[in-house]
Amino acid sequence: MSLKASKLAMVPFVSVDNMMRLVHHIGIETFLSDLATAIEHDFTRWELFDKTPRIASHSEVGVIELMPASDGELYGFKYVNGHPKNMKEGLQTVTAFGVLSNVDSGYPVLFSEMTVLTALRTGAMSAVATKHLAAKDAKTMAMIGNGAQAEFQCLAIKAVCGIEDIRLYDIDSAATEKCVKNLTGLGFSITPCSTPEDAIEGADVITVATADKDMQTILTDNMVGAGVHINAIGGDCPGKTELHRDIVARSSVFVEYPPQTRIEGEIQQMPEDHPVTELWQVITGAQSGRQSASEVTLFDGVGFAIEDFSALRYVHQKIQDTPFYIDLDLIADPDDPRDLFGMIKRAG
């Protein structure tokens, strides 16, 4: 799909307010399900994409990253940070914005907030992994870590996989109370739990989404039984994990982009040649997903730029002929492309 920039180079901009309005207009579960479909579609085109691990600038308190990808017709990138200490200061742990551009001209065709959109696409990505890797009769999910991402994970996996029985745990009981409040009335059977062991009991799917920038062992090996599928999405930078390495060692591990995941994911704990399967290969049928009822499958999800590309492409499509964006005068467009100075001079 080629997107032509306008003559005046007015770029559609989706603000936070308009993103929220768009979500309500479409319906959040439909939005999440559509995003999952968009991601699956682009993963089937995986080999067409220009790919690179995200470009990260780390500090003692967090990370700022650029995440680019291109399918040869469109180019997208996301600016995103991750600062776990922000929560204590009343700030978001993760903030983001993104741009989608026409490769043919280099002109941007979309500028969008991506703090909300990243939360939505992260939930959708876990749902895609769960759809392809969890047992087909999975009915219950344990949600470990009930912060800003938890509700999106639960809603996406409900929308895509039909799982409605949710068991919640967070080290901060206030986070669990928040999550229960937000999910009440949305078609779930919700059980708040006082320990991670209680939350995991009877769960077919375990999703772990914690924020601490540390080598954590939120799950230990004795906590994970046969046949479980795990979405480990909190370990998304070097020096940050959630699972004991023994869980990783006995699981079938599925990843987005190995050059990035081996640096940032749970498998950073393992030898460089630890076997993994790329999820796009499962989606296309080139590789097998779950192969037995007793197998433990692990989606070591760190977030990859193609997912953001998919989200931006989806939003660009959905805002057409709607009031959910404004045009920004973002790109200088002199009548004579060689006379940028003259344009400035005449504006005086």
Image: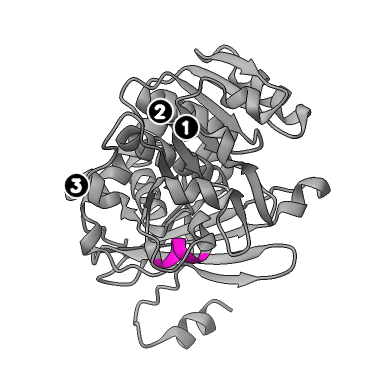
Label ID, residue 239: none
Label ID, residue 284: 3
Q: Is residue 25 visible?
A: no
Nearer to us in this view, 75 or 80: 80
Residue indicated by mark 1: 23
- Marks 1 and 2, Cα distance to the nearest angstrom? 5 Å
**Residue 257 spot, x, y in % from top left:** 37, 60
Q: Are marks 3 and 1 in contact (CB under 8 Å)?
A: no
Q: Quadrant of the C terminus?
A: bottom right
Nearer to us in this view, 35 or 83: 83
**Which is closer to the viewer, label 3 or label 1?**
3
Query: Alpha-carbon neighbours of circle 3 within 10 Å: few (<14), some, or many (≥20)?
Result: some
Residue indicated by mark 2: 26
- What is the three-letter code of the residue carrying label 1? Val
Quadrant of the image occupied by residue 4: bottom left
- In the image, the segment drawn in magenta is 259-263
SS at mark 1 in the image:
helix
Q: Residue at x 38, y 70 (%)?
A: 52
Residue farthest toward the right in the current orientation of the protein: 89
| Labels in figure, total | 3
**Residue 142 spot, x, y in % from top left:** 55, 27
Q: Are marks 1 and 2 in contact (CB under 8 Å)?
A: yes
Q: How is the image coloured?
A: one colour
SS at mark 2 in the image:
helix
